[in-house]
DNA sequence: ATAACATATGAATTATTGTTCATATGTTAT
DNA sequence: ATAACATATGAACAATAATTCATATGTTAT
């Protein structure tokens, strides 16, 4: 069923040619799909989700987040970096302290839709 | 800064007590947050995202998905299982063939919001 | 019952990722 | 300059996960 290049060779295809063409027209570029997957990977960790939920209520410094979640400063800092790189959180420095906050509204929508889905 | 239990002990907390209480009231149960992370992990892989995009256009059998994405039947089948377990796709059997399709509308919303976010 | 096809699955391998530990960087006060 | 505090980061380790390969299951036709 699979040739030497790993490409499928089913005897009878069920998709009509028009569907194939439509898929090829609508499917975003590989690079975009890769970026999209990278974004969702960020949501795919409960520590990061908790951080986002904390930031729903208020901007907060690294240490206070760590205290609230009962985790080390290092672990939280590493995860905040991931959230920062994905532009899901932003930060401002005030003396020794760095305050993190949510970067935009998509976070709420995405988490909200996820919640709705698992609630079913 | 960290005690022997790994709990943070910052000298000066910046969060006010009322914020802490609000976070503790609003934060969902650990189990729910875990399930939520599990759901987003599913979106965190470009192969699965491609499968979902394909299914936007039409229900489709495993072999045709594999052909469209240039991947093996086995790899697609494994990923479809993950999508099925997360209730993101459903399926119906017709003879030897199994047709997969999107299970609900959250998929579109979540992917759409993700797209909006990375487009910024 | 057997052959042929479509799909599913277990085990192995490779790659990725979260946390910890130790330490570095940056900031403020003395 | 030094000490103290807050945060960031690199390396290592342990845990997860994606794909491949081989094979099993399920369905249809002969």
Image (tube, coloured by chain):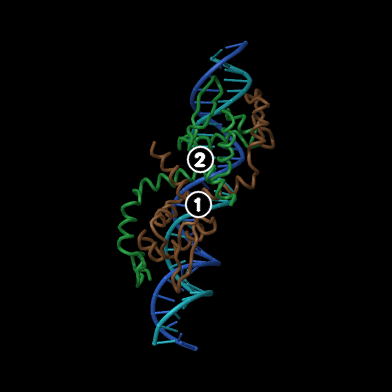
Chain colours: A brown, B green, C cyan, D blue
Q: How many marks?
A: 2
Quadrant for the C terminus of chain A in the image: top left
Front residue (pair A69, C21):
A69
Examine the rendered structure and indicate whether residue B32 appears above or below residue D25.
Answer: below
Quadrant for the N terminus of chain A in the image: top right
Q: What element carries label 2?
A: helix
Q: Mark 1 points at which residue?
A: A42
- Tell me residue B3's x, y (percent): 34, 68
Q: What element carries label 1?
A: helix
Determine contact: label 1, label 2, CB under 8 Å.
Answer: no
- Tell me residue B69's x, y (percent): 64, 36
Chain under callout 1 = A
Q: Mark 2 points at which residue?
A: B109
Examine the rendered structure and indicate whether residue C17 appears above or below residue A19.
Answer: below
Query: Based on the displayed image, in which of its 4 quarters is residue B112 positioned?
Result: top right
- Tell me residue C11's x, y (percent): 50, 40
- The lab-note entry on whether marks 1 and 2 share a chain reads no
Front residue (pair B52, B108):
B108
Name the residue located 53 percent from the left edge and 56 percent from the top edge.
Answer: A87
Examine the rendered structure and indicate whether residue D9 appears above or below residue B77.
Answer: below
Examine the rendered structure and indicate whether residue B8 appears above or below residue B80.
Answer: below
Question: Which is closer to the viewer, label 1 or label 2?
Answer: 2
């Amino acid at each position: 069923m699979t040739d030497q290049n790993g490409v499928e060779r089913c005897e009878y295809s069920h998709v009509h040619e028009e569907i194939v063409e439509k898929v090829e027209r609508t499917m975003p570029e590989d690079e975009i799909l890769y970026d999209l997957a990278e974004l969702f990977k960020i949501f795919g960790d409960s520590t990061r989700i908790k951080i986002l939920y904390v930031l729903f209520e208020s901007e907060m410094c690294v240490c206070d987040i760590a205290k609230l979640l009962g985790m080390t400063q290092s672990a939280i800092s590493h995860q905040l970096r991931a959230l920062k790189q994905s532009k899901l959180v932003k930060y401002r420095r005030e003396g020794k302290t760095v305050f993190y906050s949510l970067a935009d509204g998509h976070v709420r929508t995405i988490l909200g839709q996820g919640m709705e889905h698992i609630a079913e």
